Amino acid sequence: MSGEPKKMSRQQRRQMAKDAREQQRLDSIRADVEREMAEAPQVNQSAVEEAGLKQLCDELQVQVHEITPDGHCLFNAVADQMNVRYPAQEPYTYENMRRAAASFMRQHAEEFMPFISDLDESSAGMDESSQKKDPKARFMEYCDAMENSSAWGGQPELLALSKVLYTPIYVIQAGLPIIKIGEEEFKDRSPLCIAYHVKMYGLGEHYNSLRPKV
């Protein structure tokens, strides 16, 4: 894995803010799609999502590689992509993916803090006592949880990993445009491709790795 990230330039900060705004726009679209799926008959939701994802995978010439459905799935999916597409002497693991994302976010706290919601903090296991802390201290507590627990990761962590790994990350979900994180900044690198599932596993949100078809 690459060394410690350097201080971001003004252009990089602008690009990061642009990426974050695009993610917010797509999050809004995603919420609409998920709401429509929730209103569909339960028996059909998983099949609809699976069919939509298969179509996207066929277009991209990738196939789903299943990741264990637990709190580490996002980080395991990214680690699997790195091991397949950019193998190193030592395998990438969810542990070093968590550590890398948390470290980058701490070093660039001002850029990431506005995008961590109360729901994100709650998902990271932060309780009411955390609300008494100042925003910077709460953010550091959030990063500690991301590094050291099985807290679910999301868009902020994917953005951080794209920066640390100097590689675009594509997030594919049925019914949505592909979320392309870091594509402009790292356009000379082939993207890591992961799938985001809402209904297929019956356990809520989940990420899988999308390996090239063989």
Image (cartoon, rainbow, N blue to C red):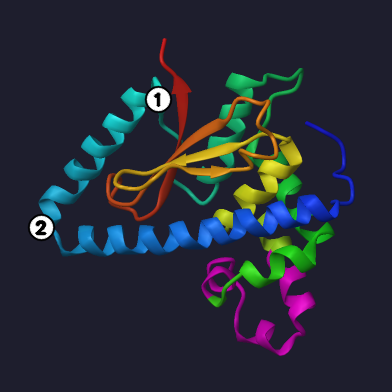
Residue 153 appearing in the image: no
User: Looking at the picture, how far across and down is residue 92, in whole percent?
Assistant: 68, 30
Identify the magenta region: 119-142
117 to 60, vertically: above or below: below
Q: Which of marks 2 and 1 is nearer the N terminus?
A: 2
Specify the quadrant of the image occupied by residue 97: top right
Q: Quadrant of the C terminus?
A: top left
Rendered residue at 84%/58% (across/down): 107
Left or right: residue 88 versus residue 67 is right
Any magenta on residue 131? yes
Q: How crowded is mark 2: few (under 14 residues within 10 Å), some or many (20 or more)?
A: few
Distance between the Cα atoms at labels 2 and 1? 29 Å
Quadrant into which the N terminus falls: top right
At horizontal 73% and vertical 20% (from top left) the residue drawn is 88
Label 1 Cα neighbours within 10 Å, binned few <14 / some 14-19 / many ≥20: some
The answer to whether marks 2 and 1 mark residues whose Cβ atoms lie closer than 8 Å is no
Residue that mark 1 sits on:
60
Residue 187 vs residue 115, the one in the foreground: 187
Q: Mark 2 points at which residue?
A: 41
